[in-house]
């Protein structure tokens, strides 16, 4: 009898251990990869920000790099550019994406084909997006300067990428073009998950189409919107490829964002320490932002 | 809808189709223009101004790109990297998503938070350390290095996707399978997996396109001609032949073809997959 | 086929205790129905027997085998879920054959079992269809079919009929009953539905807040409920209750009127009790409990009358068709042997 009881105890403990271990077993490949390829380099990267690098050696520099940031006017310009680049790209992507999702949710002839076509930009590699739009803005082979000239937006058919006042619009437009499908896809999926009874009930209760949108659609989409907007903001803010390909931060630093600045400092001027310090600044800003959005989303989810 | 006048209905239809047309034109203009220039003969490029279609066509640009460059090589490298990344990420993320979807355990909220926060890491920040680590491991100038990095960068998002798809599969089904004689892994393979195929299709599409597009890591880690991916190769090509528009466009069109085909094939899964996943959430 | 025996089962979800000291012996071939209000732990108990939940204490035996730590697949049970849980990507035939395939049974045996089961359930013409192409009732049948091809030791049902309409529900009820009579497989059946419980069960188990209140054949539960909870839960319309104080051989109600207690009741003088009378046992009479008619509802076979009496809403079920109008004053009475007596503080039966 006692032997049996001990047996049961042992089995119980084994079962408990299994239940405890099992989820971690499934998570481990993902966690190991993320840890070794992201977290460890991140920590090393943070440690770089306290060092000064020259061609063949490095030395501890304390907070020097951070102090240098305070007086760096290029960085200040880049901060403002980053904010402008992020907000403008995000707002345009989001509203155009939402509009597209709502359009694609309505029945019309050829919808399947249209859906395939309008999502296509998302599949276009980013560097190609950058190159293609740079070409479109090029007056030698691209149509856009001529169109802008014809409708009176420009006095001469020249590329907007060469003018510091307008250069940022180039990457922003390319980014919007590339990013609309992301929002459209996720929002369309979320919109399709809203039960149609809700709209029927709202219509019977006398809600106008606009009220149905604000009272039914938006509240239901809000959690998805919060998370996609957050991921997208972070992604756009850290995203250097497009600007690098189209303008490389120029002309005269007018399209220099923090991300391109880091890339350029790290590789062109080989100042890894300074680049890392700037990256830490960006990281802190983004994590703070992400935590705020996560908190907001929690509140939203609770209210719905 | 009843209760609308004929005029309102017609105006609504015109607005709908007009808006759809605007989106289609905006989406296709750059792609169309690239194709157009790629088939325009050199001598007509400047003389004809901006026409919708050149008066003569040529495929010479494609021929010279394919013959004169390493493009087939780049192409193959990119396929290897993107397909491997997409495959590995989807498998690893399926397991991770399964753990998050089906188990309750201590530390789960923390894992989700860490995964989410990895999305905020500025890529540019980890480039120098990764370059050093990969150098020490002998993984620079090497496709494996790229695959590992792309995999790690895409896992978090893919895990969230897979988690939401798996959340959409009722728990009852898995339990029924376990009563019918499955182990947990059997149930995963025979019941859950077939039901999350659309979701996995969507994940594969997301990751494949991301890997196919990536430029900065490729630029940094790869030097030798034989290991270049398409994005890196194309960019160096652009640098070398900065004036030969026709060839550049032809190369771009060639780079576009596989992703676009792949994407058109998988895009129907994107929305259905995401919808199925979202139903419960 | 096998017996099922539960000894001192405990189960907690976090700090909340969902099952407390469950003891139950189910005989080989018995059909036991678990009933109780929503959230009382019926599904949890069933799922613990299936091995889908791990229990925190106690022993579960199927046959002679202790199965506390056996995986669900090793317990040789079949379960029919409320949601049916049909595999959406498999047609009816493959749904039914799934478990046998997993067991690597020979193909002839599988074909034979599937065709026998589908004949029994009238699924013959639907074998090539996917679950989404079936109606609710047909899905339910497939779920049953999937369970019976297994020829398991025990069937578990978790509210298998609650997604069906009333008519289909009563047909399926008869079919399940007939099926059990032909297969004689031990079955445990969870339901909310009184009629299902009364008509199908060999024995009914009434649960409340994770505790078994009473176990017994349907009519015994109906005639001799062990406490106020069971008395109120079993029977529809529900039993009428009156607070009272014992006085000699009768009970004095709130309004001062008295009812004669049954002879078996052992009640101390002046004790606070609750009197329970089923609606069909209340009768109109010249004297007794004075009441006032509120609603008269003719149901055809019987007439249901709602009255106010002794400060309570009282239901009376009359087989004849009394001519009454709301507002009429009527006196009520019942035979002493039809009266249930409970202790007011413990709720336990006193007669
Ligand atoms: N996974 C869980 N985690 C925490 N609490 C749970 C869980 N599953 C069930 N419970 C709780 O356990 C109690 C019993 O649940 P159970 O599903 O067994 O009730 P039930 O009797 O089947 O109810 P119903 O008739 O509504 O199906 C409920 O209070 C429920 O809230
Ligand atoms: Mg239940």
Image: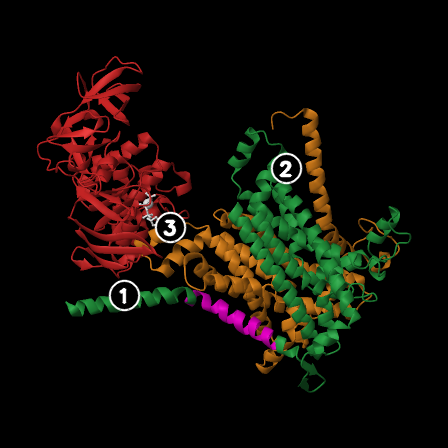
Chain colours: A green, B orange, C red
Query: Would residue B103 appear left or right of C229 to someone viewing this image?
Result: right
- Looking at the rendering, which quadrant does residue C62 occupy? bottom left
Can you tell which of label 1 and label 3 is closer to the viewer? 1
Res C237 → quadrant: top left
Check disc 3 and report its element: helix, strand or loop.
helix
Q: Quadrant of the N terminus of chain A?
A: bottom left
Label total for image: 3
- 2 or 1: tag closer to the N-terminus: 1
Q: Point out residue A61 in the picture as x, y percentages from the top left corner.
A: 68, 83
Q: Relative to C241, is C44 above or below? A: below
- Which residue matches tag 3? B173
Task: Determine the secondary structure under disc 2.
Answer: loop
Which residue is labeled 1 in the image?
Answer: A12
Left or right: residue B97 compared with residue A279 = left
Q: Are marks 2 and 1 on the same chain?
A: yes
> Residue A67, image x and y in percent?
72, 76
| Residue of label 2 | A109
Work out whether B58 lies above or below B278.
below
Q: Nearer the viewer, residue B157 or C121?
A: B157
Which of label 2 and label 3 is nearer to you? 3
Asked if the stretch drawn in magenta spans residue C163, the answer is: no
Farthest residue to the top: give it. C323
């Amino acid at each position: 009898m006692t032997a049996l009881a001990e047996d049961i105890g042992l089995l119980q403990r084994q079962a408990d251990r299994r239940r405890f271990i099992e989820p971690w077993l499934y998570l481990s490949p993902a966690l190991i990869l993320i840890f070794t390829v992201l977290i460890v380099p991140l920590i090393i990267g943070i440690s770089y920000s306290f060092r000064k690098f020259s061609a063949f050696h490095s030395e501890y520099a304390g907070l020097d790099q951070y102090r240098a940031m305070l007086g760096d006017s290029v960085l200040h310009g880049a901060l403002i550019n980053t904010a402008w680049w992020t907000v403008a790209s995000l707002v345009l992507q989001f509203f155009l994406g939402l509009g597209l999702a709502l359009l694609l949710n309505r029945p019309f002839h050829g919808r399947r084909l249209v859906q395939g076509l309008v999502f296509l930009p998302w599949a276009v590699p980013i560097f190609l997006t950058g190159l293609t739009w740079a070409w479109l803005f090029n007056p030698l082979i691209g149509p856009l300067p001529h169109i802008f000239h014809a409708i009176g937006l420009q006095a001469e058919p020249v590329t907007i990428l060469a003018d510091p006042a307008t250069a940022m619009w180039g990457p922003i437009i390319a980014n919007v073009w590339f990013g609309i499908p992301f929002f459209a896809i996720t929002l369309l999926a979320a919109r399709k998950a809203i039960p149609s009874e809700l709209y029927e009930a709202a219509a019977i209760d006398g809600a106008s189409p606009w009220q149905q949108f604000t009272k039914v659609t938006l509240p239901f989409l809000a959690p998805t919107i919060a998370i996609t907007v957050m991921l997208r903001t972070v992604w756009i803010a850290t995203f250097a490829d497009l600007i690098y390909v189209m303008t490389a931060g120029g002309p005269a630093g007018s399209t220099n964002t923090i991300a391109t600045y880091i890339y350029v400092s790290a590789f062109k001027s080989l100042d890894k320490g300074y680049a890392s310090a700037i990256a830490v600044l960006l990281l802190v800003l983004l994590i703070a932002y992400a935590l705020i959005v996560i908190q907001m989303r929690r509140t939203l989810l609770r209210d719905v | 809808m009843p209760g609308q006048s004929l005029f309102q209905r017609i105006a609504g239809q015109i607005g709908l189709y007009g808006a759809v047309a605007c989106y289609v034109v905006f989406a296709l203009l750059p792609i169309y223009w690239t194709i157009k220039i790629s088939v325009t003969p050199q001598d007509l490029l400047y003389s004809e101004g901006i026409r919708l279609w050149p008066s003569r066509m040529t495929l010479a640009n494609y021929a010279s790109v394919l013959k004169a460059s390493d493009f087939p090589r780049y192409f193959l490298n990119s396929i290897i990297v993107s397909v491997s990344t997409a495959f590995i990420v989807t498998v690893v993320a399926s397991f991770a998503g399964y753990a998050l979807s089906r188990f309750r355990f201590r530390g789960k909220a923390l894992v989700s938070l860490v995964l989410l926060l990895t999305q905020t890491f500025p890529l540019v920040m980890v480039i120098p350390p990764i370059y050093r680590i990969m150098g020490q491991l002998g993984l620079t100038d090497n496709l494996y290095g790229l695959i590992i990095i792309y995999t790690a960068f895409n896992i978090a998002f893919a895990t969230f996707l897979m988690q939401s798809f798996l959340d959409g599969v009722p728990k009852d089904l898995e339990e029924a399978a376990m009563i019918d004689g499955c182990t947990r892994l059997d149930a995963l393979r025979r019941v859950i997996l077939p039901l999350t195929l659309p979701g996995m299709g969507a994940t594969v599409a997301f990751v494949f396109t991301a890997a196919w597009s990536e430029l900065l890591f490729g630029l940094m880690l790869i030097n030798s001609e034989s290991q270049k991916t398409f994005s890196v190769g194309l960019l160096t090509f652009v640098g070398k032949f900065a004036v030969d528009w026709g060839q550049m466009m032809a190369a771009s069109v060639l780079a576009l073809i596989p992703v676009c085909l792949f994407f058109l094939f998988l895009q129907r899964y994107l929305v259905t997959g995401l919808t199925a996943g979202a139903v419960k959430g | 086929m096998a017996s099922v025996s539960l000894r001192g089962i405990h189960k907690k979800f976090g700090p909340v205790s969902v099952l407390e000291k469950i003891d139950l012996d189910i005989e080989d071939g018995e059909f036991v129905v678990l009933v109780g209000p929503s959230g009382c732990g019926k599904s949890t108990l069933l799922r613990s027997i299936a091995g889908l939940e791990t229990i925190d204490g106690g022993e579960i035996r199927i046959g002679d085998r202790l199965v506390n730590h056996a995986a669900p697949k090793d317990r040789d049970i079949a379960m029919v879920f409320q949601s049916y849980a049909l595999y959406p990507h498999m047609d009816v035939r493959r749904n039914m054959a799934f478990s046998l395939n997993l067991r690597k049974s020979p193909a002839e045996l599988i074909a034979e079992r599937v065709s026998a089961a589908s004949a029994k359930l009238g699924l013959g013409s639907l074998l090539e269809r996917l679950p989404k192409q079936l109606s609710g009732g047909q899905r339910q049948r497939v779920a049953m079919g999937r369970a019976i091809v297994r020829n398991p030791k025990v069937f578990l049902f978790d509210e298998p009929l609650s997604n069906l309409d009333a008519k289909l529900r009563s047909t399926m009820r008869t079919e399940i009953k007939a099926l059990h009579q032909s297969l004689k497989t031990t079955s445990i059946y969870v339901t909310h539905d009184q009629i299902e419980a009364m008509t199908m069960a060999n024995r009914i188990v009434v649960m409340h807040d994770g505790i078994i209140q009473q176990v017994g054949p349907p009519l015994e539960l109906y005639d001799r409920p062990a406490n106020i909870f069971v008395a109120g839960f079993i029977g529809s319309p529900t039993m009428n209750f009156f607070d009272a104080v014992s006085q000699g051989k009768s009970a004095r109600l709130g309004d001062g009127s008295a009812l004669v207690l049954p002879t078996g009741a052992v009640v101390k003088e002046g004790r606070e009790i609750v009197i329970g009378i089923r609606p069909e046992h209340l009768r109109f009479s010249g004297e007794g409990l004075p009441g006032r008619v509120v609603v008269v509802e003719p149901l055809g076979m019987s007439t249901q009358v709602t009255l106010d009496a002794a400060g309570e809403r009282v239901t009376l079920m009359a087989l004849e068709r009394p001519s009454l109008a709301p507002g009429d004053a009527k006196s009520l009475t019942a035979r002493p042997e039809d009266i249930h007596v409970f202790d007011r503080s413990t709720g336990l039966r006193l007669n």
